[in-house]
Image: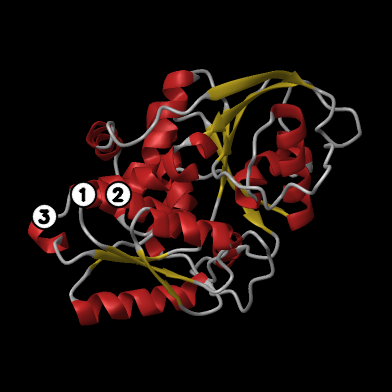
């Protein structure tokens, strides 16, 4: 059992970041047997949505960024921090740096939505667009950190970041102690690593299901191969779920603590995002709707009366077509 990040680390992170993050709502949808599920007989189950899309900056990312920044000596970050992001982590770091009063430089791949770039800049960060995918932007960020003497913050492979993201799992089980299953979107693997560590430590019998895009099955393929895999290409519009490669720490935690990973298509994430908007007035980006898509597309089928929590991890409108009416 890995002890790189422990429940004690997550508990400490929760106290450390308490004044910088929001307690986001856990909304019970109630017994579900009809739409948004696909046609066909299935037992009813209880669904709750963890609305982390209502977190400050619009995603869970400030949890990890704040926890990391709080543990670095002030003298070491005086010149500033640097990271690479497809958008949400950049926002989290920009927010954490703004709170700490230090400069932030955020490297973004070319496809990062303009609205996220504008939000990052609004928190006072310097933007640098580099490369076509996150991995290329990250290489540039690491080189910049080395050359300019800046403190680099990894978006998913840092134990302090993972512990910060794990506070979300702790929070869910405080709000709903009887949850049977947590469904979590996967990008690089920082969120699911932290959530799984917290959830399994609190309730060893809980089920943790990860969700990746069909066009970016980074950890799915790594688990299948038994080692880290670098994807040859990315074929998804969900940019925040699309690194070509994860890291060893994330793969080790996922291998130990995540029960299974399922894949969803962009169309299935879009359909879930439309349902969230039409039925619940929740504006979720594609990645934010990925956990629900695992249910709506039938990639994960709960048992009768199973208590399922789907994490809506990011806000946005990229999955909402004009005039969308669910299905």
- Residue 228 at x, y percent in the picture: 49, 69
Q: Is residue 100 left or right of residue 235?
A: left
Q: Is residue 118 left or right of residue 102?
A: right
Is residue 312 among the parts visible in the rendering? yes
> Disc 2 on helix, strand or loop?
helix
- Residue 50 at x, y percent in the picture: 55, 30
- Residue 213 at x, y percent in the picture: 66, 58
Q: Which mark is residue 316?
A: none
Front position in the image: 106 or 117: 117
How far apart are the two marked residues, 3 and 2, measured between alpha carbons?
13 Å
Q: Could you tell me which residue is drawn at 22 percent across and 82 percent down?
A: 147
Vertical placement of 114 versus 143: above or below?
above
Q: Which mark is residue 96?
A: 2
In the rendered structure, are the residues bearing label 1 and label 2 in contact, judged by CB atoms less than 8 Å apart? Answer: yes
The quarter in which the C terminus is drawn is top right
- Which residue is identified by label 1? 100
Q: Is residue 226 left or right of residue 95?
A: right
> Disc 1 on helix, strand or loop?
helix
- Which residue is identified by label 3? 74
Where residue 150 sits, quadrant-wise, is bottom left
Q: Is residue 155 left or right of residue 261?
A: left
In the rendered structure, are the residues bearing label 3 and label 2 in contact, judged by CB atoms less than 8 Å apart? Answer: no
Q: Could you tell me which residue is drawn at 63 percent across and 43 percent down?
A: 284
- Which residue extends farthest right? 40
How far apart are the two marked residues, 3 and 1, measured between alpha carbons?
9 Å
> Disc 3 on helix, strand or loop?
helix
């Amino acid at each position: 059992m890995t002890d790189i990040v422990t429940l004690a680390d997550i508990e400490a992170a929760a106290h450390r970041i308490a004044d910088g993050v929001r307690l986001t709502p856990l909304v019970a949808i109630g017994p579900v047997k009809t739409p948004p599920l696909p046609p066909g007989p299935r037992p009813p189950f209880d669904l709750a949505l963890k609305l982390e899309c209502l977190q400050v900056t619009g995603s869970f990312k400030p949890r990890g960024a704040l926890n990391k920044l709080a543990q670095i000596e002030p003298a070491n970050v005086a010149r500033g921090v640097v990271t690479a992001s497809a958008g949400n982590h950049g926002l989290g770091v920009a927010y954490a740096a703004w709170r700490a009063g230090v400069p932030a430089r955020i490297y973004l791949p070319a496809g990062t939505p303009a609205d996220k770039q504008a939000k990052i800049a609004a928190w006072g960060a310097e933007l640098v667009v580099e490369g076509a995918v996150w991995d290329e932007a990250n290489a540039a960020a690491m080189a910049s950190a080395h050359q300019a003497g800046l403190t680099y913050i990894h978006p998913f492979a840092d134990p302090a970041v993972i512990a910060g993201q794990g506070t979300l799992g702790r929070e869910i089980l405080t709000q709903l102690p009887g949850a049977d299953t947590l469904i979590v979107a996967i990008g690089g693997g920082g969120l699911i690593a932290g959530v799984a560590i917290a959830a399994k430590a609190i309730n060893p019998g809980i089920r943790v299901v990860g969700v990746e895009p069909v066009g970016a099955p980074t950890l799915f393929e790594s688990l299948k191969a038994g080692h880290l895999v670098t994807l040859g290409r990315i074929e998804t519009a969900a940019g925040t779920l699309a690194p070509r490669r994860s890291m060893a720490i994330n793969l080790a935690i996922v291998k130990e603590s995540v029960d299974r990973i399922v894949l969803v298509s962009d169309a299935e994430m879009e359909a879930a995002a439309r349902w969230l908007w039409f039925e619940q007035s929740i504006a979720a980006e594609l990645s934010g709707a990925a956990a629900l898509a695992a249910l709506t597309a039938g990639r994960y089928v709960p048992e009768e009366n199973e208590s399922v929590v789907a994490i809506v991890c990011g806000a946005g409108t990229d999955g909402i077509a004009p005039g969308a009416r669910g299905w």
